[in-house]
Image (spheres, helix red, strand yellow):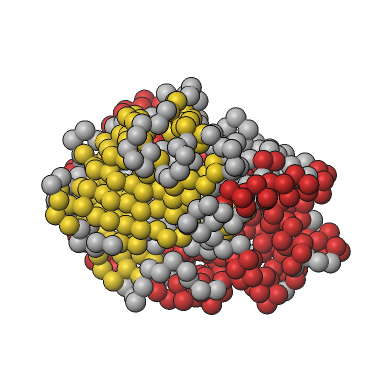
Amino acid sequence: MTYAPGRLKAAPTAFVIVLVAVVAAACSSGTEKPPMTETTPPDRDIHSYARPWEARVIHVALDLTADFTAKTLAGSATLHVNRAAGAREIVLDTKGLTVERVTDKDGAALKFTLGNADAILGRPLAVDLPASGPITIAYRTPPDAAALQWLAPSQTAGKKYPYLYSQGQAILTRTWIPTQDSPGIRQTYAATITVPRELRAVMSAEQLTPEGEESAGGRTFRFRMTHAIPPYLIAIAAGDLAFRPLGPRTGVYAEPAVVGGAATEFADLESMVTAAEALLGPYLWGRYDVLVLPPSFPFGGMENPMVTFATPTILAGDKSLVSLLAHELAHSWSGNLVTNATWSDFWLNEGFTTYVERRIMEAVYGKARADLFRVLGWRDLATEIDRLGGMQSKDTVLHVDLKGRDPDDGATQVPYEKGAALLGLIEQTVGRDKFDAYLRDYFKRHEFQSITTAQFLADIRAHLLTDKAVEAKIRLEDWIFQPAIPVNALQTKAPQLTEAGEQAAAFARGAAASSLRTKDWSTQEWQYFLQELPPTLPVDRLASLDKEFKLSDRRNSEVLYEWLHLAIRRHYEPAMPALERFLLSQGRRKFVRPLFEDLMKTDWGKGDAKRIYAAARPTYHAVTTQTLDAIVK
Ligand code: BES
Ligand code: ZN
């Protein structure tokens, strides 16, 4: 449901009270910690078939075996359910799963029905509830389950062992676990995972058997997550994984060939956690580890609890891309502790996280460095808004309308950067000390809960913006419910980037490449410089830049990406081998999507795009191919 600003205050209070009573009754029978909030039907998650007000999953116990030959996870999911009085069935989300049988606690068959498939949502699985006890679903995943990527040894660093990993956000958990796949339906979980003997399994949970145990089918690992989390955070990886500790509660997992470099790159991780705690309150998840995935991982990072999943493209060798860790770490509060109740509330996850990411960067590396990211982020937002069709596009609304759409469509720079800009404005308006105190209390008040935008608004009005005049000054509702960027947005300046911009302008005016002052430039100055160059630069000018600064040979993924982006638009032929290598060597969607788009926009590049994509596609994760299939055709 989308809010019109005027409708907000007319929340159906009586209905909410009735619902709270139903939920309280529903929770009273369970042994697990009851869910603390309910997503009210007016804020119903339109991306789930579940009807949690009737019956909701509170705990998932997985028992799965990974078969790398068949590319399938097979076994069972046992679901513990809280139900309202009189509820006779529970509706789950599935997509592509083969359901073999559903049984009660004594093994007796339960009637179940798989409904029609929707291209986005998958199929509802309705199960007749037993008189008491959990239900067990015996099932298997298809080889093309969208959450899972089964990598051949050739796609790993070591080239010897296969690799498996999952990506649940936004609505892909249903492609490997039959549960209620809605961020408002928090669940604890346990898992028994059997993988081939040579592999190690890692999950977004406490490891009960770090080395695994020999079993008939291979090596078996057990995990437990005792905090109720949204199901998109259930995650698994299995491969030839080594571990290096970084601090008392931090460490890094990666393939043996990668783990040493990753440990050096991430040396500041423990300080980041300490800085985040000083800002936001205690870190409640125990360990904070990072798993560096193979290069096909479709995202920069994914904030799976206790173990962030990260792309190896941030291993720049000079720590210059570790703001990504600050970002995923920040999600331990904004996202994992306090979660968007529906995907229209995604900005509560990403806007808060982007704001906090920069506060962590500021605490660990100083304000000047943090401001680089603020400025670059603001620029990314402007570029994104152009791509979305300009300021009046409805996709520039923070509380975005996703009716009939994949939640992925809402994952633009808008929830990240417009969201962060709103919080920056609130901070500036009320003062940093007051805002920080509010942030800490906000996370404490809602810990382990999923909340809607309306609940956030009620919270901030009750606890921070109690003065209506202050709220009016901020124009809070315009920011959240209207398109465009309100005029009161703050502008951060970063002198180092201004300087890089001046060098770009000088070069555009005809200055020689050798005369540019680029000494000591970090990744971020290079990014900004390349973004500032006019897209109309003649090819011989690109050649002189390339010759002087060896841009086509850069190993830094962000710098190389910006360079290739420019090179395609100018059809700078000498960069094309580097482009092909880049597209074939990693599958991070943020990089490959715009580059394929650039190619497809040209007459000369379409054929190359199709040829390269045909070779790269089998190596990419489904998240990336789903996006690219619509572009390269
Ligand atoms: N949670 C997101 C990744 C995500 C978003 C996955 C939506 C699926 C749907 C993660 O925290 C994130 O934002 N990653 C960014 C990096 C970050 C530094 C902006 C990414 O992957 O680019
Ligand atoms: Zn994020």
Count of marks, rendered view: 0
Judge by depth and name the residue closer to the eye, 529 or 51: 51
Q: Position of residue 362 (x, y in %)?
A: 54, 73
Can residue 472 be seen in this snapshot? yes
Query: Which one is nearer the viewer's eye here, 14 or 103?
Result: 103
Figure quadrant of the C terminus: top left
Q: In the image, what residue occupies the spot 45% across and 25% down?
A: 113
Q: What x and y, as percent, mark residue 349? A: 57, 54
Q: Position of residue 196 (x, y in %)?
A: 16, 47
Observer-nearest of 206 and 606: 206
Q: Is residue 297 left or right of residue 69?
A: right
> What residue lies at 44% left-to-right and 41% top-to-bottom?
179
Query: Which residue is nearer to you in this view: 252 or 72?
Result: 72
Quadrant, the N terminus: top right
Residue 559 seen in this snapshot: no
Task: Say if 184 sits above or below 31 in the image.
Answer: above
| Residue at point 81%, 43% (across, down) | 7
Report whether 481 appears left or right of 580.
right
Please, is residue 54 above or below residue 441 in the view?
A: above
Expressed as whole percent of the image width and height from the top left, the position of residue 494 reads: 59, 67
Name the residue rendered at 67%, 64% in the picture: 424
